[in-house]
Amino acid sequence: MVRFTKSKTMVFPREIIVGHKVTSEVAELCKRISKGNSILVVNDKITKKLSGDYICKILQKADYNVVDKIVTSPTINQVNDVIKYAKNNDIDLLLGVGGGSVIDITKLAAFDLSTPFISVPTSAAHDGIASPRASLKDKKGSVSKTAVSPFAILADTEIIHKAPYRMLASGCADVISNIPAVMDWELAHRLKGEEFSSHAAVLAKTAAELIIENADEIKTKTEESSWFAVKATIVSGVAMSVAGNTRPASGAEHMFSHMLDHLGPRIFLKGRKNKRSLHGEQCGIGAIMTMYLHGGDWQMIKNSLKKIGAPTTSEELHISKKKIVEALTKCHEIRPERYTILGETGLTEDAAKKAAKTTGVI
């Protein structure tokens, strides 16, 4: 008889607070999360004015020793700066106040420091709000890193609603792309024997369905639309915590997005300069094409993206047709150990063109 030795660790946010003006609850939340009195607020120049300064005032009134650190871009140097700053100030708790980049920097610093952190999103541009992974930029593009899930999430829909709607639509597109990502995961389980979590898969698909079913409400651009988007991105992040990896929310469509980043400067269409595409927008386009490759309902994916106002074509993404096809043919190189519908050798140029043309992406 073979002895059972399997074990697994799953780390989830201890508290999730979502709603109108919930920023006012930050001091009470910090008291429940950490017994320490020294807090570092990580933000960028924009989110500092939007929410960071207000949070610092609330914490100072609650007798916390508060310092803040401004970051600029998601690079390892910025992460190391935060780590050094936290050590110099004997920090007990970190707050990442901002979009995906700020939160990713904070979660990586918290991971290195073994210090709890609270995720305070000011936008819902992608599902990194609650996930245990972080994306950093290097010379070749985006790199995914192991980090830690937040101890808590404080998502104020009044503040998130003030962010450009494009960011919200991008986050929704990122979550919708969970559908082909889970299909990739199931395929790897069947063909390669990869470990599969049905619970994580259900959570990831539930998050996507929440966006799809409420697409008409989301497109109204009300604060309630932020409510749906934030809840979905959090559920998507929790799915990754259950799985212990990014499989529930990252398949070939994410490889496509990362390859667009790796290919270097965009070839912009005429008159489209300074219109860089967002991660979630790229994943949405990738989801349309990979859903087609799976033989799934790619029209449903495309229609849902259209409803919420996310790009569905290369022109709307502001990227040339040539770059779309190139990314689709090379994206299997991003994570060769991760089996997807692209197979181990990727698509031929003709197959990539067919997928892009049939779905109307190019």
Image: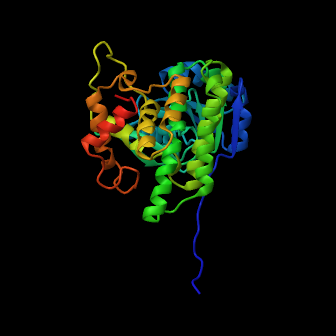
Residue 112 image position (x, y, % from top left): 48, 49
Q: Is residue 298 left or right of residue 1?
A: left
x 45%, y 38%: residue: 287
Q: Is residue 247 shown above or below 176?
A: below
Horizontal relation, residue 182 to residue 78: left or right: right
Query: Is 330 in front, or is 341?
Result: 341
Q: Looking at the figure, which quarter contains the N terminus? A: bottom right
- Vertical comparison of 263 with 122: above or below: below
Residue furthest to the top: 271
Residue closer to the observer: 149 or 307: 307
Which residue sits furthest bottom? 1
Quadrant hosting residue 262: top left
Name which residue lies at 25% across and 41% down: 349
**Residue 359, image x and y in percent?**
40, 33
Residue for point 44% across, 36% down:
288
Residue 247 position (above or below residue 259): below
Along the line of sight, the residue nearer the viewer: 114 or 88:
114
Residue 246 appears anywhere in the view: no
Q: How is the image coloured?
A: rainbow
Identify the residue at image location x=49%, y=33%. Answer: 299
Q: Can residue 29 be seen at all in this image of the molecule? A: yes
Query: How many dots with numbers?
Result: 0
Q: Position of residue 220 (x, y in %)?
A: 63, 18
Which quadrant is the C terminus positioned in? top left
**Residue 357 location (% of width, % of height):** 34, 32
